[in-house]
Amino acid sequence: MKGDEIVVGLDIGTTKICAVVGKKNEVGSIDVIGVGTAPSTGLRKGVVINIDATVDAIKKAVDEAEKMSGVQIKSATVGIAGGHIKSFNSRGIIAVKNKEVTKKDVERVIESASAVDIPIGSEVLHVIPQQFILDGQSEIKDPIGMNGVRLEVDVHIVTGAVTSAQNIMKSCERAGISVNDIVLEQLASSEAVLNEDEKEIGVCLIDGGGGTTDMVVFKKGAVHHTAVLQLGGNNFTRDLSIGLNTPESEAEKIKKIYGCVWLDRILDDEVVDVPSVGGRPPRKISRAVLTQILQARAEEIFQMFLGELQKNDLLEMLGAGVVITGGISNFEGIEELAASVFEMPVRVGKPQFIGGLTDIVKDPIFATGVGLAIYAAKHGKAGEKISRGSDEKVFNKIFERMKSWFSEFF
């Protein structure tokens, strides 16, 4: 296989690190040929706090993926998340020089929209065009070749902390992996679980990981809003640990085996053996009790996202409803609970549009890893790699490279 046919997505998460190796196929997606996972202990809420532990986990996940795929992994497209991620919409305006819009004009108007004040210590991670407006005509997806004198663009800008990105890159570099691109994790997950019709009609994707739960809203095929909530699977585990008076390690096992967030699904006589602390014998506790604990936390997360949607006037544009992916979507009853909160259709998003080892990655926990590999297949490896000892601003190189595939969004 040629080197440019192989793409790798590396999901560096709070609870697990996942490497997905894909081979580009004819339909613009990937055939999965290798997967590797390893427990993650070096991150908190999506941010690296222990580089050595993160490096070891990356090496284990990559080694497993290499053995399965028979491919030596030297570079990857990497995900980023965390509370430092901020986003907003912006508009740029320019005069068209020669009355016919060129690629240069498109680049200039996007740069105009990107010329905004951002917090010290942050840099632009994504500039995603939503629509172009030419002489007052809106909803243009690709204005190149059209005649006009005034070109505008609406974009969605995502920023992140430079230090967080640098620590991710340093961890990858020490593990022997060059970083081709850094991608917001919910954008990556959307590549794996959303179809184009949903993005066009309007859909909200909620991606629940171990440390954070992330949201992205699409309308008319473009990103309209992103948000990060610093609550995730680890909060469910701690709630159970405290509520049931059991160690967190045991609470995690109980959550995975018996986790349910919709009380109507539980029978009155269902009980669960719960280990005690301090050498005391295990106790039998009604499954309804642990369901109430988990349902309260899940409802809190959904209510916070509902508030985010209401605050930004986004609810009415969600014609395709809500899609839930990531580890949180494996809770029994998650669709019923979400539907009751959002009052619209809800489905669980599993990786799709892929070939190869689909049985291995069909679980929603692989959505981000698979999505990163699909993202790499679609947008390529344009420009030089952005790790390997570069002292330049991380996101400057990302932005320069992004300009080469702006048109691919349309």
Image: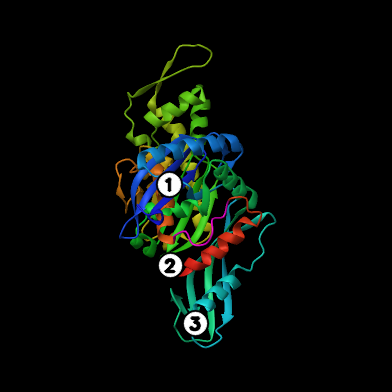
- Whether residue 69 is visible to the viewer of this picture, yes or no, is yes
As rendered, which of 389 and 364 lies closer to the eye? 389
Instruction: Please report the bounds of the magenta region as a residue range.
Output: 380-387
The image's colouring method is rainbow
Give the prevailing secondary structure in the magenta stretch: loop
Q: Tell me the amino acid under the disc marked 3.
A: Val
Q: CA distance from mark 3 to mark 1?
A: 37 Å
Q: Earlier in the sequence, mark 1 or mark 2?
A: 1
Residue appearing at x 52%, y 16% in the figure? 277
Q: CA distance from mark 1 to mark 2?
A: 21 Å
Q: Earlier in the sequence, mark 3 or mark 1?
A: 3
As rendered, which of 22 and 16 lies closer to the eye? 22
Q: Tell me the amino acid under the disc marked 1.
A: Gly
Position of 382 with respect to 319 (left or right) is right
Residue appearing at x 65%, y 57% in the figure? 392
Estimate the x, y position of residue 127 in percent, counting from the top left: 54, 64
Estimate the x, y position of residue 182 in percent, counting from the top left: 53, 53
Estimate the x, y position of residue 340 in percent, counting from the top left: 39, 47
| Mark 3 element type | loop
Residue lying farthest to the front in this orientation = 2
Q: Earlier in the sequence, mark 2 or mark 3?
A: 3
Q: Tell me the amino acid under the disc marked 2.
A: Glu
Query: In the figure, 141 relative to 171: above or below?
Result: below
Q: Which residue is mark 2?
A: 408
Position of 363 with respect to 170 (left or right) is left
Viewport quadrant of the C terminus: bottom left
Q: Which residue is mark 1?
A: 369
Q: Residues within 10 Å of mark 1 (few under 14, many from 20)?
A: many
The number of callouts visible is 3
